[in-house]
Image: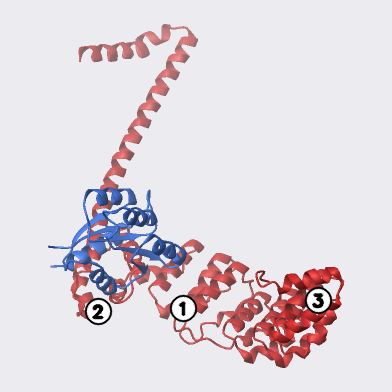
């Protein structure tokens, strides 16, 4: 079974890049450009991993973490936060809410691949 | 259809045959109505044409945007084992197919490429930089430095810095002493990042003031940029530009440059009180015991703010040589001095705390409460 990953990112280019890369790594990738759409997707289906930016329109990354980790059905889904340099305090808050990992922009794509592999339970194809 | 023709015939008849027979006020009103109708018709036509054009331009822009972002996103799908040059050579022909002779496409590609580059490090960033150079997009950035508008110059400087075009450091140096503060700041920060041989050369020629917030930005850039050759900042402690001296004092303290201590002692006589205070603060933070005598000697001729700095510095040095002096200050008429002296004594560790207990027993009721306050571990200075 292929692992399902949800990427939540408002920068179109970044979203596309992550989508392409993770598809190439063999995952089934779903995307959302804002937090509200992401929460709808999370309610409708289950994911093996969620990668979310911290700063998002409508619903922020922290709220997504809190909703995911606060729901018994999704609390075991790992969440990786993407943050810009200088948001260290928010990252701490995200960890307190239950986020599993974080990556600071700018980042290395190979590093992202390795971290994703570490967090998803099912292997990619 | 017939009704439209009849309305048109009626209007033609009204404004040609019948118009001269109307009284003058009706005639004027009719002419005004006709004028307004023509103006509105033209206005609607103009708006309609403009909207059509804008939509066409947006469609075109979206199409190119999509093409460019797909091309860029495809860079992600390369083998991790491939070397940067191979990947660049693979993607370059695809990028060259874009009509880059059209300015808006070139601008769009540059913008997207820079945005992409800002988010990645490692091979992806190297490939994007390689493509940027091989597509000659850097020439536009260099040309921006010659623009008459400072905003354009800043745009060029940012682009050059992001893409690490180190050969352009010399070109940027000329803007490091510009009258325009924003441009000056961008150029100074860029020069530190790009210059290989002497990234602080701009300090030699800085005549314009480096604003406080700008000093913060520069401090961040200097201390966080990797591989910057850090010089001895004491070199600029005798600068005529006070803001340069201030910045260098902060850097001397950050890098703990002990060679600067004799020059900082000279700054105890500086006419600018902020510089004097900062030099004393540095001596304290660097715990430079060898010059504490200078601190003691200068004390009596200084204004209150500087006296406080001296006391604090003696506390940080904590050699114990000036405990008696600090004790004498606890009887000062000035509350701030008394408080600072008690804290300075406390910084001396066990010997200081012993002295504080003695002071407690020997002093007045008011001083006792200050000592209690200073000795309270829950309260931080």
Q: Is residue B266 toward the left or the right of residue A124 in the image?
A: right
Helix, strand or loop at label 3? It is: helix
Percent across and percent down for residue B4 are: 25, 15
Helix, strand or loop at label 1? It is: loop
The residue mark sitting in front, 2 or 1, is: 1
Q: Earlier in the sequence, mark 2 or mark 1?
A: 2
Quarter of the image for residue B264 reads bottom right
Chain blue in the figure, letter: A
Give residue B360's mark.
3
Which of the pair B206/B324 is nearer the observer? B324
Percent across and percent down for residue A109 are: 28, 71
Q: Mark 1 points at which residue?
A: B225
Say above or below: B26 vs B235.
above
Residue sitting at 33 percent across and 39 percent down?
A: B50
Say above or below: B121 vs A83.
below
Q: Is residue A6 toward the left or the right of residue A57 in the image?
A: left
Report, in whole angstroms, how far the alpha carbon at label 2 lies from the one at label 1.
24 Å
Residue sitting at 35 percent across and 35 percent down?
A: B47
């Amino acid at each position: 079974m292929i692992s399902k990953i949800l990427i939540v990112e408002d920068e179109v280019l970044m979203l596309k890049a992550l989508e392409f890369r993770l598809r190439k790594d063999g995952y089934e990738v779903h995307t959302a450009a804002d937090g509200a759409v992401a929460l709808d997707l999370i309610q409708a289906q289950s994911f093996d991993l969620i990668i979310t930016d911290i700063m998002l329109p409508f619903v922020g990354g922290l709220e997504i973490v809190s909703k995911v980790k606060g729901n018994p059905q999704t609390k075991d889904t790992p969440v990786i936060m993407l943050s810009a340099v200088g948001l260290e305090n928010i990252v701490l808050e995200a960890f307190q809410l239950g986020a599993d990992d974080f990556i600071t922009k700018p980042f290395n794509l190979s590093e992202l691949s390795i971290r994703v592999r570490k967090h998803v339970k099912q292997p990619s194809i | 259809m017939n009704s439209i023709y009849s309305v048109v015939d009626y209007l033609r008849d009204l404004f040609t045959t019948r118009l001269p027979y109307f009284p003058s006020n009706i005639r004027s009103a009719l002419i005004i109505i006709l004028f307004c109708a023509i103006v509105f018709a033209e206005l609607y036509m103009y708006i309609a044409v403009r909207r059509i054009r804008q939509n066409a331009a947006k469609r075109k822009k979206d199409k190119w945007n999509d093409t460019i972002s797909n091309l860029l996103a495809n860079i992600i799908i390369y083998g991790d084992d491939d070397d940067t040059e191979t990947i660049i050579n693979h993607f370059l022909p695809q990028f060259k197919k874009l009509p880059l002779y059209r300015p808006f496409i070139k601008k769009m590609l540059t913008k997207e490429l820079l945005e992409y580059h800002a988010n990645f490090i490692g091979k992806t960033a190297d490939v994007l930089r390689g493509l940027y150079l091989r597509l000659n997009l850097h020439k536009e950035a260099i040309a921006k430095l010659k623009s008459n508008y400072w905003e354009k110059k800043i745009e060029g400087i940012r682009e050059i810095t992001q893409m690490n075009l180190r050969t352009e450091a010399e070109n940027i140096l000329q803007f490091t002493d510009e009258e325009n503060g924003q441009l000056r700041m961008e150029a100074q920060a860029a020069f530190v990042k790009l210059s290989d041989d002497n990234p602080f050369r701009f300090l030699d020629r800085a005549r314009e003031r480096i604003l406080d917030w700008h000093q913060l930005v520069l401090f961040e850039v200097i201390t966080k940029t990797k591989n910057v050759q850090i010089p001895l900042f004491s070199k600029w402690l005798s600068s005529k530009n006070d803001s340069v001296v201030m910045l260098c004092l902060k850097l001397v303290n950050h890098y703990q440059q002990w060679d600067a201590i004799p020059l900082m002692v000279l700054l105890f006589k500086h006419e600018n009180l902020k510089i004097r205070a900062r030099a004393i603060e540095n001596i304290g933070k660097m715990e430079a015991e060898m010059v504490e005598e200078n601190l003691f000697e200068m004390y009596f001729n200084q204004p209150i703010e500087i006296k406080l700095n001296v006391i604090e510095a003696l506390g940080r040095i904590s050699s114990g040589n000036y405990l008696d002096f600090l004790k004498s200050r606890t009887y000062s008429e000035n509350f701030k001095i008394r408080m600072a002296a008690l804290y300075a004594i406390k910084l001396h560790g066990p010997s200081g705390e012993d002295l504080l207990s003695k002071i407690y027993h020997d002093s007045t009721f008011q001083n006792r409460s200050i000592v209690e306050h200073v000795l309270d571990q829950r309260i931080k200075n």
